[in-house]
Amino acid sequence: MKKKEIINIFKKYSLKIYKKKSINKKSFEDLGVDSLKTVEMIAEFENKFKIQLSDKDLNKKAFQSVDNFTKIILKKL
């Protein structure tokens, strides 16, 4: 259930064309998520799931795909 909630948050911040498509393998860039949207989205994840994402969590690999980022969040739960 948590994974679906995470994906829904991603879709909220992504381009309209991805609202109803599978996005697991897409990068933030593919989804049209710019740096401001990324900061807003991270804040939403932290607030919603009561987690703290560190700089170590938010490495380059984390942003390569929605799947990678989702795994990081799920590990924090």
Image (spheres, grey):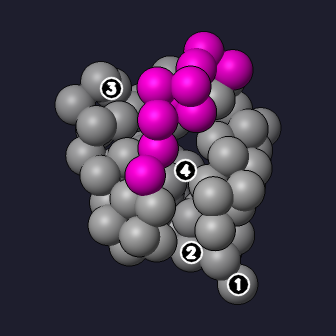
Crowd band around label 2 with a 10 angstrom C-alpha radius: few (<14), some (14–19), many (20+)? few
In which quarter of the view is residue 44 placed? bottom left
Give coordinates of residue 23: x percent, y percent: 68, 48
Which one is closest to the eye, mark 3 or mark 4? 3
Image marks 2 and 1: residues in contact by CB distance under 8 Å: yes
Q: Secondary structure at mark 3?
A: loop
Which segment did they paint magenta? 52-61
**Mark earlier in primary sequence (3, 2):** 2
Q: Which residue is mark 3?
A: 34
Residue at 43%, 52% in the rendered image: 52
Is residue 43 inside the magenta stretch?
no
Asked whether, in this view, residue 53 is left or right of residue 30, the answer is left
Name the chief secondary structure element in magenta. loop
The label number, if any, that marks residue 5 in the structure image? 2
Distance, label 4 to label 1, CA atoms, is 20 Å
**Mark earlier in primary sequence (3, 4):** 4
Which one is closest to the eye, mark 3 or mark 2? 2
> Number of numbered discs present?
4
Distance, label 3 to label 4, CA atoms, is 15 Å
Give coordinates of residue 13: x percent, y percent: 36, 50
Q: Which residue is mark 1?
A: 1
Give coordinates of residue 69: x percent, y percent: 64, 42
Distance, label 1 to label 3, CA atoms, is 27 Å
Crowd band around label 1 with a 10 angstrom C-alpha radius: few (<14), some (14–19), many (20+)? few
Distance, label 2 to label 1, CA atoms, is 7 Å
Identify whether 4 is placed above or below 73: below
Indicate the quadrant containing the C terminus: top left, top right, bottom left or bottom right. Answer: bottom right
Which one is closest to the eye, mark 1 or mark 3? 1
Q: Amino acid at mark 1?
A: Met
Q: Amino acid at mark 4?
A: Tyr
Image marks 1 and 3: residues in contact by CB distance under 8 Å: no
Q: Which residue is mark 4?
A: 18
